Amino acid sequence: MIYRFLMLLTLLSSNYLIGDLMKPTSLSKDLYSNTILNGNYLDTISHPDNFLDFDYGTRVASPHQIENAIRAYALQSDRLKVIEYGKTHEGRTLFALYISSPENLANLDNIQKSIAKLSDARATSDREAKSLIESLPATAWMAYSIHGNETSGADAALGIIYHLIASKDNALTNMLDNMIVIVDPMMNPDGRDRFVKSLEQYRGTAPNYDDQSLLHSGDWPYARTNHYYFDLNRDWFYLTQPETQGRVPLINKWRPQILVDGHEMGAQDTFMTGPPREPINTNIDRDLIKWGNVFADDQAKAFDDNNWRFYTGEWHEDLYPGYSFYIQFRGSLGILYEQSRMSEDGVRRPEGTIQSYKESVHHQFVSTLANLKTLEKHTKAMYQDFWDGRKYNVSKNSEFANQTFVVLPTENIGRLNTFAKKLQAQDIEIYLNTKPIQTKSALKQTGDSQENYVIPAGSMIIPNLQPEAPLIAAILEFDAEIIESVLEEERRQTLKNGSSIMYDTTAFNLTMMYGLEAVTVQENIQGNLSKWEPSKIDNTINKDALMWAVNGMDDRSVAFAARLMELGIEVRIIDKESILSDQNLPRGSVVVIEMDNPNFENLSSVVGSVASDLSISVVSIDSGFGPEELPDWGGRHFRLLERPQIALMAQQNFSSYDVGVSWWSLDHHLGIRHSMVNGSSVSYGDLTRYNTIIMPSGYQGLSNSEMSSIRDWVKQGGTLIAHNGSSRSLASENGIGSVRQISSTFDKSEAYNMDLQREFGALSVEIDMQKVNENKVDFEVEYPWEVSKNKFNKAQLEMRDKWQSLFMPSGAIVAGRIDNEHWLTFGTVDTLPVLYGNNPVLMTSNNSEAAVRVGQIIENKEATTYRTINWSDMPPNTDLNVKMSGLVWPEASQRIANSAYLTRERVGRGQVILFSGEPNFRGAALGTSRLWLNAVVYGAGLGTSPRIDP
Ligand SMILES: [Zn+2]
């Protein structure tokens, strides 16, 4: 920091030349002469300039500088109370600044209690509500720069804090008597710090107004995201990152009337705010749209007064509940600012003018004050609407009342507990039924209804007649409703321009993301429920046992195996369901056998302590005999694992999101050693250090020599795991292995169909004993591909594929059918929801395995013959469910039906594992993430030839 300070001093002072660098001819700080902080201020509060090495607003304040100012202001002002609500991965503090009159600040606990009362209409009467509304101050949560390289918001926040605590203006102090402003000045300090560093690194002498320069763009992994390259503005209900985990529960406690979220957008844009356009999630209270317009109107007037350009709506939609608009499902008004990005120096526009950074800070500052004034005017009416909404949510006549979400019992205790924690962090009330419950009918995740459905005992019951009904509906309903006019517009745009009006995924159902089986019941289930509690963990260890085992359905069993192997313990996995010492062990259960580890001291206590770190139950087993046909410990179903030595490819050409979430998944789910390596090191590095290489999405440009060094490494026993874009490269003619993308298979489509028919045949074997025992040749043998009616030739298939590929989903959930004997599918449900976007459509032939395919097979008695979908035939009496949630056009369903989502192929002594999509998407796709964990931790042992030391 000192270095930076000195450098700036010399750069900016006009008399100096450093070494042989020339003095610049102009300085960007002179571009904009308006003063942002133009009030009449107390001199007991330090002006922001005191914490900066430049004039306030002219450059990007570092997280460190902002933090220094916050800590100083906490001591200087009685209008301020500073809360630390979390720490980032890199150890930076996350602050919320409560700014109000000293009286209000002394009374925060009571105010919060009143807000809680006003939020639960089951416990509060209209009369009480009326008096609460009269007495409550207005509340505003003003949050900035959740994307680290969108810097102007946090700079504005610094000025806002100063302005609110230092102003002598009566109107402002009066406002604070009746309002609590909570400033969340810098939502992503790790990302911001990355950007500040890149500004330092790419700074030359003269200012740079070219938005294509590195000074403006920064470089990989870019600074939008947090430490693990997560987009924090997609994490509001997935709650995977410490920033969100600290912030959201605090916001939920305060239920601010407005939540402002200050961003930046493309450099050549202007300023966008105001209510969104369709699609808007139908669970949002429409009163909020009305209020959105009221706020936008006042803000627009403030912009008009300054001669500043702006717009509302346009690309701003609101279907996905994981943006900051999350709070709208809880009755608060969300207000988005999108300021064009200036990156310090300013940006030259097509008309030749330069928009300065300081002006962009000023826009956010003026918007903030305008919004606070509007809130001051309308707070009581907004509280009234809020109260009406809260009453509606718990009313028997609401659209939510007769609906209950049910998560079916599972042995995957770790995942279920995580799911419960996410719901509880959002004030969602969850229950347990100890006895079965009879219902009229239930809707399943695949869209089928079942009459007279009985909810099994031990399910998690979430009645939607409760205060957070709209939020619950938004994240647990199987399909978000998209209105017809939006679908028409989407289809029109798709056909005309190949573009989409959907800004994010159209599917986000939390049970499906988690791969937990669930049903929706169209009635309000209330009776005979107890509060849901996590099941008890038992990891008492009998140290004299033959072996110790953990249940393979539980995701934490994978971490258990990985962590033990890292400690040098030999670990086995049982690849077939078994019963040992009366303990039921599903396939994928992990065992540690004393005899495998004769020289390991304290084996039983290490096993016990690893299990207790992971909160997973362990069973001690005295006998290796499995009754009847079940596996015994000396047989081939007790398979020895091999410690994964992992390299994760990163840097240029890889999607930073997919690299980041893969990295986070290794650290978060496993916590074992691994190396993140530069992707280009495949051509010069020593790959033999690793037995497992992960290639996140993105790599399109492997050279022939890079491809051949990876191929050689695989042949010598490596496990290569690739995602999405990288799978696309590997499934090409000069890739590795025989998996192909669909577009290159149409001349062999009958062979692919034949392989598929073998799979179908094996799924439902029916034998005619008389025919089997017949000695004469049967002239009537039926061959599936000959019986099928509709056949398409290569040209037709190509035409169809071209057309269908226009309609690929922009993020929807489709049904995956698993091969339930494959080790890659340990711990997954039979119909696995899979997030699918514009993925490579993968085709396996008989050399390669499809561990997961697209489409759930269901019975259809009316289908009496084989029916054809593009290249594949569906046998008689079957139908195929593809869509589970979100927008999947019928054309897309046809295109991806029966293709592979996850493939595995032996190549030499090693193997290639391809995911069509990104299995760990946003750290929230726990269903497919389990497939990936299986690949990473078990791949080296189960899928490659074992190495025996000579
Ligand atoms: Zn943003």
Image: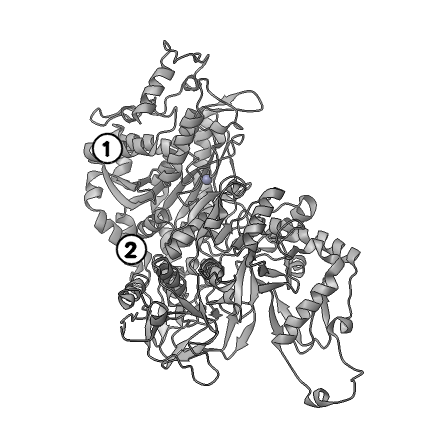
Rendered location of residue 891, percent (x, y): 68, 58
Q: Amino acid at mark 2?
A: Ala
Identify whether 2 is placed above or below 92: above
User: In this figure, which residue is indicated by the disc labeled 2?
Assistant: 116
Residue at x 55% of width, y 73% of height: 449
Q: Secondary structure at mark 1?
A: helix
Whether residues under marks 1 and 2 lie with C-beta atoms below 8 angstroms apart, the answer is no
Quarter of the image with the C terminus in it: bottom left
The answer to whether residue 808 is seen in the rendering is yes
Locate residue 579 relative to residue 809 in the image: left or right. Answer: left
Report whether 862 appears left or right of 55: right
**Can residue 702 be spotted in the picture?**
no
The image shows residue 317 at horizontal and vertical percentages of 52, 46
* Residue at screen point 29% across, 46% down: 85
Residue 772: image x %, image y %? 70, 87
- In the picture, measured across the screen, residue 72 lies left or right of residue 713, that is left
Comparing 759 with 467, the one in front is: 759
Q: What kind of residue is marked 1?
A: Tyr
Residue on which disc 1 sits: 73
